[in-house]
Image: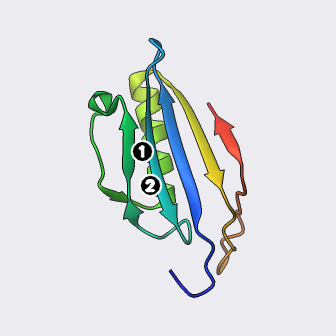
Amino acid sequence: MGRGSQVVIQICTLRFKDGRTVTARIEAGSRHDECDVLYAGAVDRLPILFQRADSVLLRALFQSFARELRTTFREEFIGTWVPVGGDAENESGSTQES
């Protein structure tokens, strides 16, 4: 992370039909920083675990898991990334469900 970078927390959650959930969380200075992934909940239900991921990969993985496992997907960002070099998408405190 560069000096003055804002750390953003990204949390991806899957909710199974039985109500159980699994979450993955990263804290990154940009959406392209590879970070340790912290998992919680029904982790044993995931087909694969990545120890490190960036924001783009984490989102893609959990959206894929949601389709494969027929769960609901929720994504939350806490904080704001400063767009860098054409990275115009800037999610701030947002939540997305599918």
Whole-angstrom CA distance, mark 1 to mark 2, is 6 Å
Image disc number at residue 94: none
For the view shown, which residue lies furthest in the bottom direction? 3
Image disc number at residue 57: 2
Give the residue type at disc 2.
Answer: Leu
Residue that badge 1 annotates: 61
42 or 32, which is in the foreground? 42
Q: Is residue 10 left or right of residue 42?
A: right
Q: Residues within 10 Å of mark 1 (few under 14, many from 20)?
A: some
Q: Residue at x 66, y 71 (%)?
A: 87
* Image height of 65 relative to 72, above or below: below
Q: Residue at x 38, y 38 (%)?
A: 40
Give the residue type at disc 1.
Answer: Leu
Q: Position of residue 95 (x, y in %)?
A: 68, 42
Q: Residue at x 53, y 46 (%)?
A: 11
Q: Total marks drawn?
A: 2
Look at the numbered disc 2 and give the secondary structure of its residue.
helix
In this picture the colour scheme is rainbow
Q: Quadrant of the C terminus?
A: top right
Question: Which of the 4 quarters of the picture holds residue 20?
Answer: top left
Q: Residue at x 46, y 30 (%)?
A: 66
* Image height of 52 relative to 42, above or below: below
* Image height of 97 relative to 6, above or below: above
Q: Is residue 54 left or right of residue 36?
A: right
Q: Position of residue 97 (x, y in %)?
A: 64, 33
Look at the numbered disc 1 and give the secondary structure of its residue.
helix
Q: Position of residue 71 (x, y in %)?
A: 48, 23
Do the residues under discs 1 and 2 have CB atoms within 8 angstroms?
yes
Question: Which of the 4 quarters of the picture holds residue 44?
Answer: top left
For the view shown, which residue lies furthest in the top direction? 18
Q: Residues within 10 Å of mark 2 (few under 14, many from 20)?
A: some
